[in-house]
Image: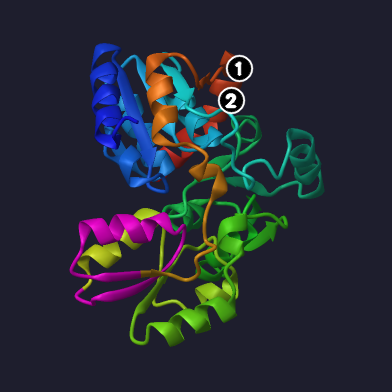
Amino acid sequence: MKLIRDIQEEIIRLKKEKDICILAHCYQSDDIMEVADFTGDSFGLAKKAAQSGHKNVIMCGVRFMAETVKILAPEKRVYLPRGEAGCPMAEQLDIDMLRQLKEMYEGYTVVCYINTTAELKTLCDVCVTSSSAVKIIRQIDNDKILFIPDCNLGDYVSKQIPEKQFKFIQGGCPTHARLTVNDVKNAKAAHPGALLLTHPECRPEVVAMSDFVGSTTEIMDFAANSPEKAFIIGTESSICSHLGMSHPDKLFFPITKDCVCHNMKVTNLVDVLHCVQGVDGEEIDLDSDTISKAKVCIDEMLRMGG
């Protein structure tokens, strides 16, 4: 049996030989993060890939993330190591449903979370990330906002901007929505004094109990820079592992052992090896019309400082 390090060294050799940039979302495992050229949140990774000089990109994440790379860098060949790695939140709406919602809420500015498919983005006015949503929506001239697809993130944003009228759909991240008030109470009882850091995709009642709310990267930065030594992490459990490896002098506890994104976990190190070898993986193929129309809402986000 090959050692993990042997597989990693072969991946590193092949990516250099084949001009491949490897992106790893921070919900991926440590062994994948170690062979990546860039790690972080989905949109940050897409921007890094677009700015890189590599002709080929492998996204170790889920489909909408790879699509975003293709939208920002259509000249590159973009691959998912496992084609079935999807995002339940991104797939909760389809194009016909969004058309109906736009008819129902005529006159509303359609704001989509980055966690949406390329197809849905073609019908949206502006895209946002969890870290940029409040800043961008504050700048929108229209006071009526149709926010898709995460109603929990939408609720968090709406509380920061009470002067605007929001409409949501009942959608969101199953992994974050799984966390409950009882989970928080149990975690705080087990780890008294630990700060609770949560993602705004969590339920509003969980967010309300938090010491800090932010994107995955913001959570990691807060924990790294805080003088405190113990934290309860209210996002995908792999973040506890990454933070623990980077800051062994601190303690990191998941709210529950069940806060796991199975779509993120479907990709393993051998899948990445097979993808760089060219024997497996799926190339992301978007037509030029989808790319140009989906890029409009992303460009608007960038224009507004996202």
Three-letter code for the amino acid on which mark 1 is drawn:
Asp
Q: Nearer the viewer, residue 165 or 293?
A: 293
| 40 left or right, relative to 159 | left
Q: Residues within 10 Å of mark 1 (few under 14, many from 20)?
A: few
Dot 2: what SS?
helix
Nearest the eye: 208 or 181: 181
> Above or below — where is 126 with respect to 1?
below
Q: Is residue 30 magenta?
A: no
Q: Are marks 2 and 1 in contact (CB under 8 Å)?
A: yes
Distance of mark 2 from mark 1, alpha carbons? 6 Å
| Above or below, comparing residue 184 to residue 221 in the picture | below
For badge 2, the amino acid type reads Lys
Task: Please tell me the numbered disc located at residue 293.
Answer: 2
Q: Which residue is mark 1?
A: 289
In the picture, residue 52 is in which quadrant?
top left
Nearer to us in this view, 92 or 5 = 5
At horizontal 24% and vertical 56% (from top left) the residue drawn is 245
Residue 51: mark in rendering: none
Q: Is residue 274 left or right of residue 185?
A: left
Q: Is residue 285 left or right of residue 93?
A: left
Number of labels in the image equals: 2
